[in-house]
Image: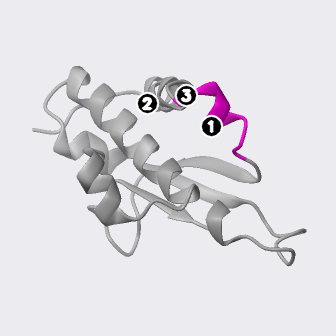
Amino acid sequence: MAVTMSADRFEELVGDALDLIPPELASAIDNVVVLIEPRNPEDPHLLGLYHGIALTERDSHYGGSLPDTVTIYREAILDVCGDEREVVEEVAITVIHEIAHYFGIDEDRLHELGWG
């Protein structure tokens, strides 16, 4: 059963999840925008998406690029959770998962680490 939650509360949870990133990693995040959208129009069940050039793939041509984006899909996450505790956990997992892509960590490695 989907959870009902205000957009403000959900945004607060995303901010809390970003605060879980260790300071030494957070300080390395550059040129990334975190967005919250209702759903991904191409895949409505997708919980989050990183779009950009991973830190490990950036070279001297990267300068001047538009910001990378991490998009967290609120309605999709609320759909898969049964209560607010599950939403808190899923938001944290999804945010960390997508930020990990920024650092060049692929899906297989994230699953090995338990962030899949």
| Quarter of the rendering occupied by the N terminus | top left
Instruction: Check disc 3 and report its element: helix, strand or loop.
Output: helix
* The stretch drawn in magenta includes residue 26: yes
Q: Mark 3 — residue?
A: 15
Q: Quadrant of residue 62?
A: bottom right
Read off the magenta span. 21-29
The kind of residue tagged 2 is: Phe
Residue at image position (49%, 25%) is: 20
When asked about the image quadrant of residue 41, the answer is: bottom left
Q: Which residue is mark 2?
A: 10
Where residue 91 appears, as percent x and y from the top left, is 37, 36
Judge whether residue 23 is colored magenta. Answer: yes
Q: Earlier in the sequence, mark 3 or mark 1?
A: 3
Q: Earlier in the sequence, mark 3 or mark 2?
A: 2
Q: Quadrant of residue 26?
A: top right
Label 3 crowd bin: few (<14), some (14–19), many (20+), radius 10 Å: some
Which residue does the image show at 21% across and 28% down from the upper left? 86
Please tell me which residue is depicted at 47% across the width and 29% down the height of the picture: 17
Along the line of sight, the residue nearer the viewer: 22 or 70: 22
- The residue identified by callout 1 is 25
Count of number-bearing discs = 3
* Distance in Å between CA atoms under marks 1 and 2: 23 Å
Q: Earlier in the sequence, mark 1 or mark 2?
A: 2
Q: Seen in the image, is 95 located left or right of residue 57?
A: left
Res 46 seen here:
no
Give the label, 1 or 2, closer to the camera. Answer: 1
Q: Amino acid at mark 3?
A: Gly
Q: Amino acid at mark 1?
A: Leu
**Residue 22 drawn above or below residue 30:** above
Q: Is residue 28 left or right of residue 116?
A: right
Residue visible at 29% across and 29% down in the picture: 89
